[in-house]
Image (cartoon, grey):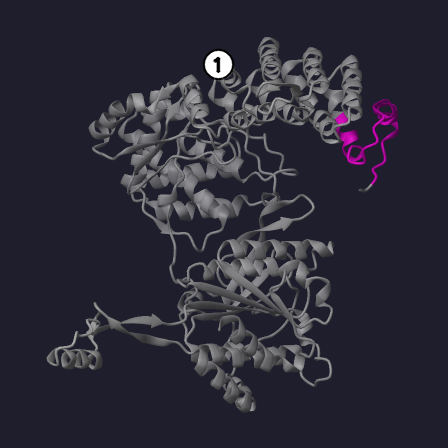
Amino acid sequence: METVAIPAELEAYWKQLDCGFPRVQPIFADCIWEALTALSTDGVNAYIEYARFLGKMGRGAEPILIFLEEWPSVARILGEDALPAIAECIRRMYKSPNGKAITPFLQSLPSVARRLPTGQQMQEYLTLVLEFMESTTGSIHGIHQTFASPGLPELFKQVPMLLGQLSLAGLKKWVDYGARHYSDHPERQIDYFSLQSADSRAVLQRERHGTLLADNERQLDMYLRGLWREEDQLIPYSNAFDELRQPVPYYDKLGIRLPDVYNDAHGISGIDRYRALLAHMVGHRRWSTAIFADNMSPFQRMAVEFFEDSRVEYLVMREYPGLRRIFMALHPIPAENACDPEKESGVRHRLTMMSRALLDPDHPYQNPHVIEFAQRFHALMEAGGTGTQEMAELAIAFVAKTRRQSDQLAKTHFKDTVIDYRDDNRHLWKFYEQSDDEEMFEEHRQKSADEEIKGLPPRHYREWDYNTQSYRPDWVSVYEALHPKGNAADIDKLLEKHAALAKRLKKMLDLLKPQDKVRIRYQEEGSELDLDVALRSLIDYKSGASPDPRINMSHRNDGRNIAVMVLLDLSQSLNEKAAGCDQTILELSQEAVSLLGWAVEKLGDPFAIAGFHSNTRHDVRYLHIKGYSEHWGDEVKGRLAAMEASYSTRMGAAMRHAAHYMEKQQADKKLMLILTDGEPADVDSKDGRLLIEDARQAVQELDQQGIYAYCINLDPKADEYVADIFGKQYAIIDRVESLPERLPQLFISLTK
């Protein structure tokens, strides 16, 4: 790990810490600067001393790292004088067999502090923890030895969510139940405190407080029928057991999905929160229409949803003005300057401000774009002719006018941007089923002044960062279009050149070609009478012998059901001459793909061909050569003849985009063939492993989607990296001049 120099003014603190973990030094300076602004002199000294203890107790670097990063913010909430009690709790865990619980305890501490911000509440929580630890540490199944509490780490993992659902008293009752019933059953104790067992969830539900849907379903049903002339089934779901992905209300043909409990919030009762949510959904059902989502980026779709949500609420409040009080109390008011555009993406922040401004004439914002679009919105609403499509156009214009470079940052500003009475808007979108049809691309294709093909608006894909073991969201922009056309006769000449090879391939293909129907004879029940067997049975009957009753036959299909995608690397290196050959790698690839396309067409398998290259993550080109709905003809041959190679190889993004089309194919098997001459690389990626690891992650994603990815690599040095990406699913062709023969043969062997 890279060593970071400690500033001279912080050297004394570093020596006092006396830490030997390499992972601590890079973050130390930032942590101390934050501590110096948040803590007193005595508080800083106590902070250093206790961090030193955590580093020396033999539990690795994780406890000291968490404490250094989190304590200053926790101290702002609880005060510095909370440290001794927390330290004592950790010491008692350290001296007991429960040392493994220290790290999850520290990880949960910031969330606990936000839920229990007073010293008294925190002390009660620590007492609860120690009592639970002591009651479940000891003998198990009557064996008098000292054992760790199995449920303690699980409790710390769940406690942020639990405190969001329970009061401190309710948490104590829930913990006491588990400790009392499972103190001598370690496996069942783990199930209880990880919320896996039925009684764990039942006790949690019993201790929750708020407005329960089950208690108010009849009242809300009458609200829908009486005020909105709507009737639908209200279906509850629970927020208690999915901490990472909190469910969001929505409606579909089966009914309206609502949280099973609502607490009072922002001065609004739980029952009024239900009323606001139902009014919002009814507004969508009454005034929203679904629009196509395929040509919109994620940011544009988000903006459309915010604007359309505001439109239906505007109409709802116009019909029932009393709802304004509830909506305005529940809608957040994000501070105008709360988002730092240098460090975080501010898209959600701007859209939440815009949403507030659309609904609240007394909004506090001075941003000229917010004011301008609020005026345009109200002008449209007053005109009375606006709908979902007009809102989409207004939203896209807002995104275009307020776009910043920092919007692409992975860290997003979320504070005061969650409008929790709104649904997930799945009803707003519809999609093209055959989205690779050539007519659609011809309709949208545009050329700039330098004739560069941009095609449809970009699709944004995530990219895997192996350094942080996480995805960078919306990191890569993929532009797609039809490949320009060339002379189809050039491909016919290539096929004539390989006529002898095509003749040999045809014999192999005839063996693979499926038979539409195969007879199944000797059936007692079937779709047709088997005349040969029926006559023989009749003769047996006339002659007094027992006739064979299996006089029918049926049929079964014996066809292949394989969808194929051929993905071609069209990077600059294909323009190089192949070793020992006068042709370029690109020309050999054209010949090989021409033979492959002819072969697959003979078999009748649905297949598509596309090429890709990239010029940084902002410009990955995906060029459609053949779509699944097209036949192998002059149009496709013309595009194949015009293939050119340029730029770089961002393979992971191209595979993800190809999978977007493959997943819509109805086939038992899906095969993606990637033809490339080198490792994934791009001009904006200095780390050579980054795009290799991303491509490896993309292959794993394809496997989860049921798509078999296979690489045909023309690079003589491919052994150094191709197995890292594709595992055993690859072939290296050292003699590139043999590619026209090897590629169709590989396809046949993979699909026979």
Q: Residue at x 56, y 60 (%)?
A: 655
Residue 577, image x, y percentages: 71, 80
Direction front: furthest residue:
544
Above or below 42: residue 707: below
Callout 1 crowding tier (Cα within 10 Å): few <14, some 14–19, many ≥20: some
Secondary structure of residue under mark 1: helix
Q: Which range is magenta?
A: 3-32
Q: Residue 735 occupies which quadrant of the picture?
A: bottom right
Residue 510, image x, y percentages: 44, 83
Q: Nearer the viewer, residue 25 or 352?
A: 25
Residue 467, image x, y percentages: 70, 46
Asked if one can make out residue 378 in the rendered structure from this viewpoint, the answer is no
Answer with left or right where residue 722 lies relative to residue 158: right
Q: Nearer the viewer, residue 671 or 244?
A: 671
Taking the magenta stretch, the answer to whether it contains residue 704 is no
Q: Residue at x 63, y 77 (%)?
A: 586
Above or below 662: residue 181: above
Q: Amino acid at mark 1?
A: Lys
Disc 1 marks which residue? 173
Q: Residue at x 39, y 39 (%)?
A: 377
| Number of callouts | 1
Asked if one can make out residue 445 in the rendered structure from this viewpoint, the answer is yes
Above or below 576: residue 171: above
